[in-house]
Amino acid sequence: MAPDIRPHCGEIERTPRTKSLKSSTTRSVQILHLLAFARMSLLFKRFVGFEYYVRDLERMARFCREGLGFRELGRSSARLERGNDQRSLAFSAGNTSVICSAPLGPASPAARYLARHPDGVGSLVFEVADIVATFAKLEQNGATPITEVESFDDERGSLSSFSITTPFGDTTFRFIQRRGRVGVLPGLAPHESASGDEFGFADVDHVTANLLTMKPALLWLEHVLELKPFWGVQFHTADVASNHGSGLRSQVLWDPDSGFKLACNEPLRPAFDRSQISIFCRDNRGDGVQHVALGVRDIIGSVRKLRERGVELMPAPPGYYDRLPQHLQELGLERIDEDPRTLEELGILVDGSGPGAYLLQIFLKDAASAFDSADAGPFFFELIQRKGDAGFGAGNFRALFASVEREQLARAG
Ligand SMILES: [Fe+2]
């Protein structure tokens, strides 16, 4: 299916933040400063992780530790808990930090988020080279900071950060600059004996958000965060399932410097209300982050371990592997390194864009299904191994769509 990314039209009118200028010299200096400033990038270094707000911290910790093999980095100190009114556990999945937080009192960010939503991603965290410059540039671009730049110190180093609101419901974006060996969460009491990363996770490949309408978010990402269009697709299953067909439109934007990619999905008519995107927004009680895709170096080894540990994965659609040889031929993939029988045994999906360019992916069941609790929310993880393909598995979108729909129908029934 042909990509459907189109550049948006129109420029946001900038409002200069300078006050009246007293002299021509001052004016020239300020104009030069503004010109230099306008060319300055946001100085993203990388996407470093996310904060996940949960009601049952121990249940989520067991899942991260025992199910996903995340490395436990530490937990919030008593001082940090008193300050934040929430308890946090920090994990790493490869280079990515996952902070799970549960409220201790009603004033915490976790409590405010959970008062409106089931468990879910409350914040995405980005590391930047110059926190003050990023704050100024984002504010100039029209971002809405929640806080000023705040600094924290512990015995391992210092961290400066601020957060902004986003068009993704109550999910915020947090920007940090670190000095020393401080983690993403300052004040963490580190576990010195933490075990290693068992699954070989690499960086986060992409983050996907679901929205009832994505245009405001796309404009915001382009104008405020200065992300660029990367990939897009839309499809509808009405052609194969006339009684319950549904669809989505998806667009991916990215930051070319850091490689961070954010996919946005919105429902597509007909049967708008039955689209899995609409159902996510209903179950999540608003727009939000649907999944985080973790890059893996050996998806077969990772999925074997996940299955051994009883982690539930989304099944491939019926007949997927019967059609796989034809599917690969249509993609121009004469051969892949993996044995198709192994992929079938493990439920791993394949997609690609031509000879020698393919990807392997699989989706975990969403938290509500995995924990059999609606309050656990509709968020899930994806695992992806890229072998020369930069796409997002357009062919598998349909497969995932069908799987998610079946899961949603099973939950409803
Ligand atoms: Fe994905």
Image (tube, helix red, strand yellow):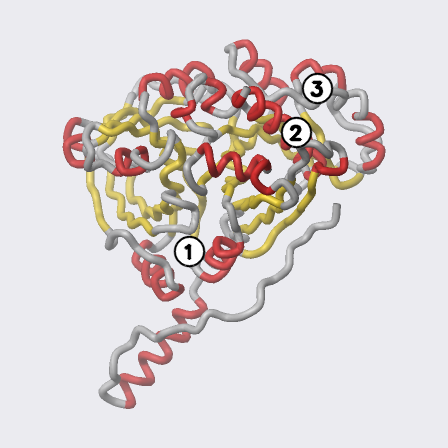
The crowd level at tag 3 (other Cα within 10 Å; few <14, some 14-19, many 20+) is some
In percent of the image, x 37 and y 47: which residue is there? Answer: 173
The image quarter in which residue 393 lies: top right
Residue 343: numbered disc:
3
Q: Secondary structure at mark 3?
A: helix
Label 2 CB less than 8 angstroms from ligand 1: no
How many numbered badges does the structure rendering display? 3
Residue type at the position of mark 2: Ala
Confirm or reject: label 3 Cβ below 8 Å from ligand 1: no
The answer to whether residue 363 of the structure is visible from this angle is yes
* Residue found 30% across the figure and 58% down from its top: 132
> Horizontal and vertical percent for residue 10?
54, 70
Q: Residue at x 49, y 49 (%)?
A: 258
- What numbered label is drawn on residue 43? 1
Specify the quadrant that holds the N terminus: top right
In the drawing, does residue 9 fall left or right of residue 110? right
